[in-house]
Image (cartoon, rainbow, N blue to C red):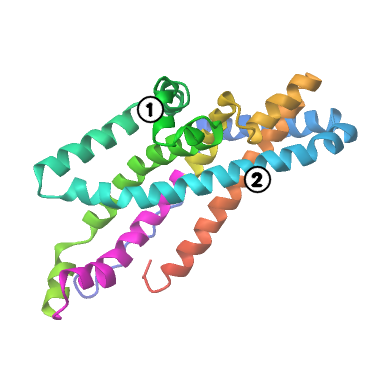
Amino acid sequence: MTAGAPAPAPAAARRPGLAGLIFLGFWLAAGLALVAYLASRYDPALIERFAPVYLSGLWTTVSLVAISFMIGAALSVPVAFGRMSRNRAARALTFAYVSFFRGTPLIAQIFLVYYGFGIFRAEFEAVNLWWFFREAWYCAIFAISLNTAAYQAEILRGAIESVGRGQWEGGRSLGLSRTATFRRIILPQAMIVALRPYANEIILLVKASAIVAIITVFDLMGETRRAYGRTFDFQTYIWAAVLYLALVEVLRRATDFVERRITRHLVR
């Protein structure tokens, strides 16, 4: 910019268009209608009867997601490095793994484990593993862990590859080994990039975990189905949706807090 040139005028704030206002009004009306419905159908006896059951199901959901995510995180590390490997066999195997679990529905994977592995009962009993695959809880953890490992592997790979090559060269110029450079320079930057995708993956797992109710795992959705079967009150599903929404909102706010803490040194 030349000396004396006038500063550019600040861009005027865009006002929401008619379509945006209609869309916002629709969801506002839907929210108010939901609140009015819950207020009109509020049944203290129903809440008192099923609140402990819902909390038990919520804890099952949280436990299932947490365990599966941590196992998936551990499995994703070798898969991510296999995807980045120069070895063709490693790249091919990890690519096939990621493609299968990302390209097929989670419900099909759960059915494949829960119902399909029963064909090999004699083989599992021979190696003392049938106790694991006969339980719906363990089958759900097994299937969800393998599924999220594929997604987390791609998140980790993308985050590592997003760090510029200059960072590797900077570490080399400081006399750091490749392992030390990765641990002290590359990985911290990659984790900042991966934070939001990881949080999104956890939120997706929370919502996707509801399908384990089909194989008799009494998570939040499983307990909700049982409550509806006893009362035939549609309100039971609405309260389940409210609990899912509250859980997702807690995760979203926790992610915002962590992101603010670890990016304080960055200029935004």
Q: Of helix, strand and loop, which one carries label 1?
A: helix
Q: Quadrant of residue 44?
A: top right
Res. 36 image quadrant: top right
What is the x, y in percent for residue 139? 48, 33
Quarter of the image where the N terminus is located? bottom left
Residue 123, label in figure? 1
- Residue depicted at 60% across the width and 27% down the height: 216
In this view, 6 is above or below 77: below
Name the amino acid type tagged 2: Trp
Q: Which residue is mark 2?
A: 59
Residue 204 shows in this picture: yes
Q: Amino acid at mark 1?
A: Glu
Q: CA distance from mark 2 to mark 1?
A: 34 Å
Residue 195 lies, with reference to residue 120, above or below; the image says below
Q: Is residue 183 left or right of residue 13?
A: left
> Which residue is rendered at x = 47% and y = 65% of the image?
260
Sequence-first tag of 2 and 1: 2
**Residue 117 colored magenta?**
no
User: Which label sits on residue 1?
Assistant: none
Q: Residue at x 50, y 56 (%)?
A: 255
Majority secondary structure of the magenta segment? helix
Q: Would you place residue 130 above or below residue 70 in this image?
A: above
Q: Residue at x 66, y 42 (%)?
A: 58
**Is residue 197 left or right of 133 when viewed as pictured?**
left
**Range drawn in magenta:** 174-201
User: How far across and how far down the image is residue 228, in percent?
Assistant: 74, 23
Decide: few, some or many residues near mark 1? Use Cα within 10 Å; few <14, some 14-19, many ≥20.
Answer: few
Point out the image quarter for the C terminus.
bottom left
